[in-house]
Amino acid sequence: MFSKSKYVLTFSKTRYTIIIVNDREVKNMDKLFIKNKLKKLRGNMTIEEVAYKNGITYSALVQYESENRIPCIKTKVKLSDFYELTVQGLFYLEQNKKDIQS
């Protein structure tokens, strides 16, 4: 049985990424995980600074960091480029579990 997948091609200044999103991957995105990861990576920068540098709104970043919202794919690419991580490494639990184990 085949699952329905969406293929998203995204471009940034330095690379392009093909992201396959299916039901399993969406379930692996955890709002608490995203919140903690974004706060940790932000470090001493303010929410305003990070939002401005990534071209996203202050309120959107606040919602990501307070578990109210998960970023859209375009924002995921912006944030992963900013922090020099892959989208999977920044937002997906499955990828991070593999990174920790290796």
Image (cartoon, rainbow, N blue to C red):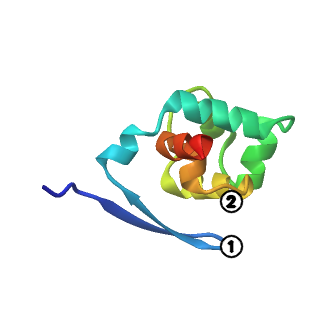
CB within 8 Å, label 1 to label 2: yes
Distance between the alpha carbons at the discs numbered 1 and 2: 9 Å
SS state under label 1:
loop
Relative image position of residue 24 (x, y in whole percent): 33, 45
Image quarter in which the N terminus is found: bottom left
Relative image position of residue 87 (x, y in whole percent): 57, 54
Relative image position of residue 49 (x, y in whole percent): 81, 44
Q: Which residue is mark 2?
A: 81
- Residue lying at 61% horizontally and 31% vertically, measured from the top left: 35
Quarter-of-image position of residue 43:
top right
Relative image position of residue 54 (x, y in whole percent): 71, 54
SS state under label 2:
helix
Q: Earlier in the sequence, mark 1 or mark 2?
A: 1
Q: Which residue is mark 1?
A: 13
Q: Is residue 52 left or right of residue 77?
A: right
Residue at the extreme front: 102
